[in-house]
Image (cartoon, rainbow, N blue to C red):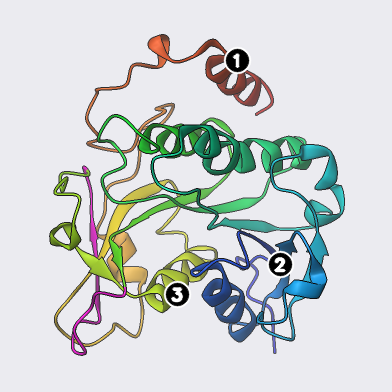
Amino acid sequence: MTQDPKKPGTVLVVGATGSVGRHVVAEAVRQGYETRALVRDAARAGRLAAAAQKVVGELTRAETLTDAVAGVDAVIFTQGSSYGDATAAEAVDYGAVKNVLEAVNGRRVRIALMTSIGVTRRGGTHDWKRRSERLVRASGNAYTIVRPGWFDYNDNDQLAVTLLQGDTRHAGSPADGVIARHQIARVLVDSLASDASDHLTFELVAEHGPAQDNLEPVFGALDRDPVGSFDGVRDQANMPVAAEPERVRQDLSALAASR
């Protein structure tokens, strides 16, 4: 098979053993990527696709990630902390992104980051997910930020991938939108080789209808994030960077300086 010159060769999946991460690993393998799964314990990662390479590291400790990021062309982040635990959210939702970018050490990689629909609603763990998005935008890498709705609440005929922008759905229930885990995985993996998905931030839900064969026109219908912005296009301006914790502002400044 001839390698698409736009397509990354080796992909690292962070959060690989999670409920979405396992689907991402399988989808990346299916699409022909050399797939590397970050795990804490290789002996307990037997449910992952057999073709994936398991690499041991601790996503909350940058010094353990050297082997995981060595030679990778792309990183997909699917890790998530327990809702409502702000300490874990800082360490996992935000910390994993910070630590992987630190381990990559300024080398250009394609990034796909999963956060959550409603991420711009202030409070709780969402603020740390939003800060992780800001790290990705500040890094200077090509990226796609995916904010999925509620997992696996789809009807059987609810398969049409639908992308929204502005994060306006804040019910905190499946009324915000639903999406299957395998669909999230497909969107994350498809984005890696897509020019149209670069510098996009969007909410991901499914509507009634069949799944699209090609997501490129779906990506292409969206607006890109403004150049130099820390936030997604049309996001609420309700979290000023100047009011962020000092450690977060330092992280953003360091990433911007390394571009």
Q: Is residue 181 left or right of residue 70?
A: left
Q: Give yes or no for residue 218 being in the magenta stretch.
A: no
Question: What amino acid type should be assigned to the residue bearing mark 1?
Answer: Gln
Looking at the rendered structure, the secondary structure element under dot 3 is helix
- Where is the N terminus found, in terms of image quarters? bottom right
* Between 40 and 157, the one nearer to me in the picture: 40
Q: Which mark is residue 186?
A: 3
Which residue is denoted by mark 1 in the rendering?
250
Q: Give yes or no for residue 156 being in the magenta stretch.
A: yes
Kindly check if marks 3 and 2 are in contact, taking CB atoms under 8 A apart as contact.
no
Looking at the rendered structure, the secondary structure element under dot 2 is strand
Q: Is residue 161 left or right of residue 52?
A: left
Q: Earlier in the sequence, mark 2 or mark 1?
A: 2
Looking at the rendered structure, the secondary structure element under dot 1 is helix
Expressed as whole percent of the image width and height from the top left, the position of residue 244 reads: 44, 15
Q: Rounded to the nearest whole Å, what is the CA distance between mark 3 and mark 1?
A: 34 Å
Q: Which mark is residue 46?
A: none
**Closer to the observer: label 3 or label 2?**
2
Question: What amino acid type should be assigned to the residue bearing mark 3?
Answer: Arg
Which residue is denoted by mark 2 in the rendering?
37
Give the magenta-colored segment's residue range: 152-166
Residue 179 to residue 146: above or below: below
Query: Going 28% across and 84% down the picture, which residue do you hit?
Result: 211
Q: Earlier in the sequence, mark 3 or mark 2?
A: 2
Expressed as whole percent of the image width and height from the top left, the position of residue 199 reads: 43, 46
